[in-house]
Amino acid sequence: MASLPAVHVTTDALSSLDVDVLIVPVFRGGIEGPGADTALSALGLADVPRDAGFRGKPGEVLHLAAPGQPWGQVTLVGLGRLDQLSDEMVRRAAGSAIRSVASHAATVATTLPLANVSLATIRAAAEGALLGAYRYDDARSEPRPLTITDISLVIPSSLAADADEAVRRAGVHAAAQCVARELVTAPPNLMGPVEVAERALDLAGDDVDVEVWDTDRLIEEGCGGLLAVARGSARPPRLVHLRYSPADPIASIALVGKGITFDTGGISLKRPSSIMESMKGDMGGAAAVLAVFTALAQLQVPIAVHGMLCLAENMPGADAQRPSDVITIRGGTTVEVLNTDAEGRLVLADGLALAEESEPDAIVDVATLTGAAMRAIGNRASAVFANDDDLLRQLLGAADDAGEAMWHLPMWEDLRDNLDSDVADLENLGRGDEAGATMGALFLREFVGRTPWAHLDIAGPFWQDEDRYHQPKHGTGVPVRTLLRWLEGAGR
Ligand code: BES
Ligand code: MN
Ligand code: ZN
């Protein structure tokens, strides 16, 4: 994977920073307003081009020459309005600024907005800067690596004592998120179930155990959901069980990830085919769960964590499952498969049943499950469903801290009947209703017992067509930082 630059903090005077680029965040109002002029005259740069049109809107950048200064260039970046300043706006500005210089500068320093600088702000700036300095670069014959190597955050000396640890944690979160981005963006011929399982095996070590089940083992263990979905593909399925076991854990949780390495829909083929290319990222849930395991030990997470990656490719091959087949999930529940494109819930059913068997205190599944979630709340937010208010509150809080939008959707009891099948215990679709994301959640709930459980539908935010702030286009790595914030917060 492409390596990320190093981030450090400094309390040195700006005039002593010998860097290629100095980044200066500016509030809305821009050069005409209260932001840039003050910032720039403090830097000895009076000569601002008034016609540049820079307004300080979020993510807007303006590159200025800096003659006679130690920095090769000054880059102004918009922060948006002062009265709307938040850590997320700082994260976004840092990401936009770094993204705009990352392929021509090596060393960069950035100041922070004068108002409201806290350790959380420093952490957000470091996260945004690192996340903006990522680009998928593994599939070119001639790599085009970014040039950026060092990022200095100029901080007030009052915060210096704890800033290193805040920046270290930011680095762990950002690196983990980039692992998920890379898995999502990697082409599906190079990243099938076997390859994802190999990436998980790479994590095995002192703190993490990894067990991989192949087809024969899945048959023995009765994982009929994974086996049914994989039948149409020449590539075999895999179930990966990761275990992180700190000394004296205060609790245990399980994370379950949908890992469809490509989703054609199967015999219920997706139409039009142009919507198919982003389906290489239909393993975004499994990618996020795998990525979390790269970070747990470094964050000294005090709880035991199980991870289940449900990996299969959904293809319409000669042996593919047919609409109206009945399959048996781990644990014995039978499902009539009315639409082979509702495959995520079939592999997750096995994964949730297995997660229950390790008797965790909570289960969270992560899945690119339904286009309906995206149509309901847009493609920038994850939908969250939960059977437990406390778990729901914790996850919404963690998402807020991470700056990853998340919205609670209902599991209407009234709609449960729609999952009743004419021939089996359940059908996989939930006929006759428009609440597609809710039907997916209600189906998954059937495989969870009394354990507090939440389902994150990331069908919207797992992918992005355009560069945006700290998110370069394509795989986003959502919701890795939310999950890490949640787990990090558990012991406090
Ligand atoms: N992977 C898709 C959902 C999806 C769609 C994710 C768009 C990201 C972007 C999932 O397997 C699927 O096909 N869902 C169907 C469910 C339906 C057949 C009940 C859908 O959303 O249309
Ligand atoms: Mn599908
Ligand atoms: Zn899918």
Image (spheres, rainbow, N blue to C red):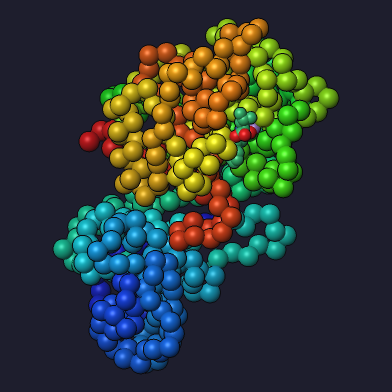
- Residue 337: x, y in percent? 67, 18
Say left or right for 23 vs 435. left
- Residue 21: x, y in percent? 42, 77
Say left or right for 20 vs 344. left
Residue 440 seen: no
Rendering quarter of residue 59: bottom left
Q: Residue at (24%, 56%) from the top-left corner?
A: 119
Residue 361 seen: yes
Q: Quarter for ligand 1?
A: top right
- Residue 217: x, y in percent? 64, 15
Q: Residue furthest right?
A: 318
* 37 in relation to 390, above or below: below
Q: Nearer the viewer, residue 49 or 128?
A: 49
* 109 in relation to 476, above or below: below
Q: Residue at (43%, 18%) from the top-left corner?
A: 413
Q: Residue at (29%, 84%) from the top-left corner?
A: 37
What is the quadrant of the C terminus in the image? top left
Say left or right for 268 vs 351. right
- Residue 2: x, y in percent? 56, 56
Q: Residue furthest left?
A: 158
Q: Nearer the viewer, residue 225 or 85?
A: 85
Q: Residue at (16%, 63%) from the top-left corner?
A: 158
Q: Nearer the viewer, residue 343 or 179?
A: 343
